[in-house]
Image: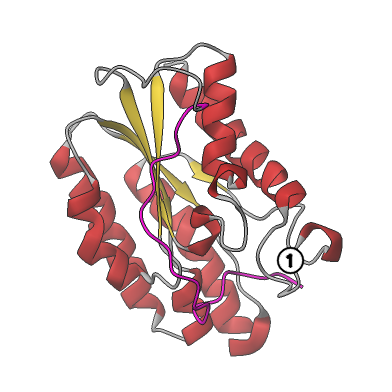
């Protein structure tokens, strides 16, 4: 079974910048920003924010002495429509790379596929308008077959379709090797545990590291 993040979680989440170790000095403002823009998967619902995959990516970046600051703009329950409405606020002149992780809540709600695709495309356009040199990485998502096999398959195909159309890198499936594995998910069977987040971070890093080297 393939699981996606639930839109029904009630835990309050705020947009959080994942920081370096508290004993270190604050990073210089000249450092480029990597924006993780998504829902509860990005926010790390049920875990300390330091255990969410964006923070683990920051740790990896720090270990390699790369000059990037990670911003965790994950918000639980976010759909592509609500994400579109807050994206402009999250973007700024320092964002060099954006990892776009949205759509799963659309699928769980049965939102028309053309709406999800159009919203994702608009967010890609907004990011490019904010900075013509921004690098965008699209995180692929899949949903359970509750809505029927046709809807499920077409939902899955939205992501590679948009990645090809916009010539942007794709993380094929954010939860690869995590979804459906009980010991890697919290009690809800949906959101990764600390160990699961480590695997998700590796899935992201495999694509992100190429963009950092360019």
Is 186 placed above or below 147 here? Answer: above
Residue farthest toward the front in the current orientation of the protein: 23
Residue farthest toward the top in the current orientation of the protein: 65
Residue 129 versus residue 68: which sits nearer the camera? 68
Q: Is residue 140 visible?
A: no
Say which quadrant the C terminus sits in: top left
Q: Is residue 118 magenta?
A: no
Say which quadrant the N terminus sits in: bottom right
Where residue 126 appears, as percent x and y from the top left, is 19, 51
Q: What's the magenta region?
A: 1-21
Label 1 sits on a secondary structure element that is: loop
Label 1 sits on residue: 186
- Quadrant assignment, res 74: bottom left
Q: Is residue 15 magenta?
A: yes
Residue at position x 59%, y 16% in the image: 63
- Magenta region, main secondary structure: loop
């Amino acid at each position: 079974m393939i699981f996606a993040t639930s839109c029904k979680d009630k835990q309050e989440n705020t947009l959080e910048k994942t920081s370096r170790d508290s004993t270190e000095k604050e990073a210089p403002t000249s450092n480029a920003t990597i924006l993780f823009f998504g829902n509860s998967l990005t926010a790390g619902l049920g875990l300390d924010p330091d255990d969410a995959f964006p923070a683990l990516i920051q740790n990896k970046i720090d270990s390699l002495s790369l000059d990037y600051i990670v911003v965790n703009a994950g918000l639980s329950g976010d759909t592509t429509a609500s994400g579109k409405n807050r994206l402009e606020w999250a973007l700024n002149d320092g964002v060099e790379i954006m990892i776009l992780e949205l759509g799963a809540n659309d699928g769980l709600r049965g939102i028309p596929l053309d709406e999800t695709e159009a919203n994702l495309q608009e967010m890609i356009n907004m990011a490019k308008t904010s900075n013509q040199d921004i690098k965008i990485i699209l995180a692929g998502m899949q949903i359970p077959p509750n809505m029927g096999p046709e809807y499920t398959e077409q939902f899955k195909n939205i992501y590679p379709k948009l990645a090809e159309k916009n010539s942007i890198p794709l993380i094929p499936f954010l939860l690869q090797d995590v979804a459906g594995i009980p010991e890697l998910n919290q009690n809800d069977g949906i959101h990764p545990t600390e160990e699961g987040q480590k695997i998700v971070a590796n899935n992201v890093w495999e694509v992100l590291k190429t963009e950092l080297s360019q």
